[in-house]
Image: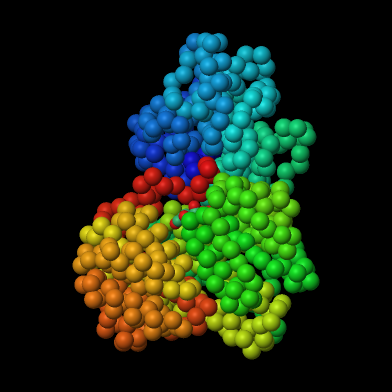
Amino acid sequence: MCGIVGYTGPQRAAPILVGGLRRLEYRGYDSAGLATVEEDRLILRKRAGRVRALEELVEEQPAPGGAGISHTRWATHGPASDRNAHPHLGGRGGEWRVAVVHNGVIENHSALRRELESQGFAFASQTDTEVIAHLIARELESTTDLFEAVRRILQRLEGTYGLGVVAPEHPGEIIGARFGSPLVVGLGEGEHFLASDPVAIAPHTARVAYLQDGEVVRLTPDHFEMRHLEHGPITPRIDRLDWKPDAVELGGHAHYMIKEIFEQPETVVDACRGRLRRGEATAVFGGLNLTDRQLRRIRRIVFAACGTSWHAALVGEYLIERLAHLPVEVEYASEFRYRNAPMDDRTLVFVLSQSGETADTLGALREARRRGHLTLAIVNTVGSSIARESEGGIYLHAGPEVGVASTKAFSAQVAVLAMLALYLGRLRHLSFPDGLAVVEAIDSAPALIGEALQSEPEVERAADRIAGVRNALYLGRDIHFPVALEGALKLKEISYIHAEGYPTAEMKHGPIALVDRETPCIFVAPRGSLHAKTLSNVEEVRARHGMVLAVGTRGDSTLAERADIFLPIPEAPEVIQPLLAVVPLQLLAYHVALRRGCDIDKPRNLAKSVTVE
Ligand code: F6R
């Protein structure tokens, strides 16, 4: 939530900052701003609204200077307004000594504010961030070292921060600091970048250094140095972003969401690359950091995640129970972290996260580790907090996901969980032929997802029919129940239609009361073990004059005849059906939202990567 971009170097900072903010806008988009330093002058431009509004402002009133910081906001303290937009300035009596951008929440900001007000610091905003700016300004009255001023005040802050700081008396210098909110340095030739997410700076450089909690960095065009608040100077580790060149560009698509939906065949190829072993009918993972013997001792698995990642984990539960006969529990990370869930030392905890920065999931990871459980991560973002703090895990290799509505990360997670189920199964009772059938099924998934994507024209016709409805029910049995939940989440988050997912048979225990001609019941019902039972549930809806949409196996005329709208997916083994069935549901949400004129990549009230509790 919220995005930070900083630049110092020979180029004009403002266009680089605005370009970076545009790529970060998915992280928060209720206001945007930047501050540059030219010679010893601080130039501030900020505005409520989208990055486009800031861009217009900078066109009207240019912001010269070769160093600067910028921010796109998702409001926590104080509504979206010009005043509350970042950067915030610090100083007394109209003398601005510093500009600050901040991600995170300062929990003791009220006490700090009172202290600063009593000393003559006037506040212009309702944000918690402004205290940081004034605290630094106060330190700059007694030191000429900006790095030292920032370092000193960090000890006063309670809460989380990713910070970017510039000061007119220190042209060309940017200070960054991290505690609980990500920050990365980009290394160029004679220039340096700072960002809360490498997506912002990826077009400029692939060489990055991630800050860890408690670290502070000083950037000038030619130099960067890092210190840990307690342990002093450190030698940073330089990583390389191995993204494809067009990973963060729209590439001719209207929205990131549709681009990422269509990337899914490739996403699954990347998630499976080098991991399937036909000769042994199993899968292998390089980073689990557990021996087969240790894994055989495990008696139970707990998955903790939020949102779409939680839905993927539910698919994992069905797969692992089916293939490995291991009990699995799927927990909301936000609940898990505060519960007294009894767990023994043969329980293995996995947290799942696309961003690797979700505050609740990170909290669950820390709590599980504190209790002494083996805790692994299934995560997309390399170098993220969750990736770093877990004892091992599996990367999704899905590349950056920019659309706020998660799509390709879900597919990558399901593919990884299918391989994990296979691997755990093969460590136990799963036979070679049964294992091989799973390998072949997973191997066939990318091409079949490609075929499922071809149902887009049918989906568009379905979208025409349902774009005006107020409610929708998504229903699925067994492994398709989580797919129904995911379909409902996609629709509600980007089209604002109220949608709920249920296990199909659960409908008659209450939700059926909602069924009428105007409420589509969207059945996720590819041919499989419980198909006949699903057909009876479809009849129950038809008997009440409900509108039936069905995602089913191409050629399933029994289902197609009973449905008002039939969305076909290719015939496939059950273990990979969720990867196919989710596709028309993602497309449906997209096309409904398009027809309703919604802002698909920036849905109302949401932001990618929820780094607050
Ligand atoms: C839904 C969505 C969210 C995220 C959730 C967890 O489309 O994007 O529900 O899935 O906030 O995020 P990660 O996976 O980054 O931990």
Where in the figure is residue 546, as x and y percent of width and height? Answer: 24, 70
Q: Which of 6/9 is in front?
A: 6
- The image position of residue 389, as x and y in percent, is 68, 50
x then y, percent, for residue 74: 44, 40
Residue 518 occupies quadrant:
bottom left
Residue 62, image x and y in percent? Answer: 41, 30
Give the residue drawn at x 44%, y 43%: 28
Outermost residue toward the front in this view: 509
Image position of 282 with respect to 493: above or below? below
Residue farthest to the bottom, as pictured? 433
Q: Quadrant of residue 328?
A: bottom right
At 67% from the left and 86% from the top, the residue drawn is 431
Q: Does 200 sit above or below residue 449?
A: above
**569 or 238, which is in the foreground?**
569
**Could you tell me which residue is drawn at 53 percent across and 37 percent down?**
103
Please indicate whether residue 541 sits to the left or right of residue 28 in the image: left
Between 344 and 370, the residue placed more toward the observer is 344
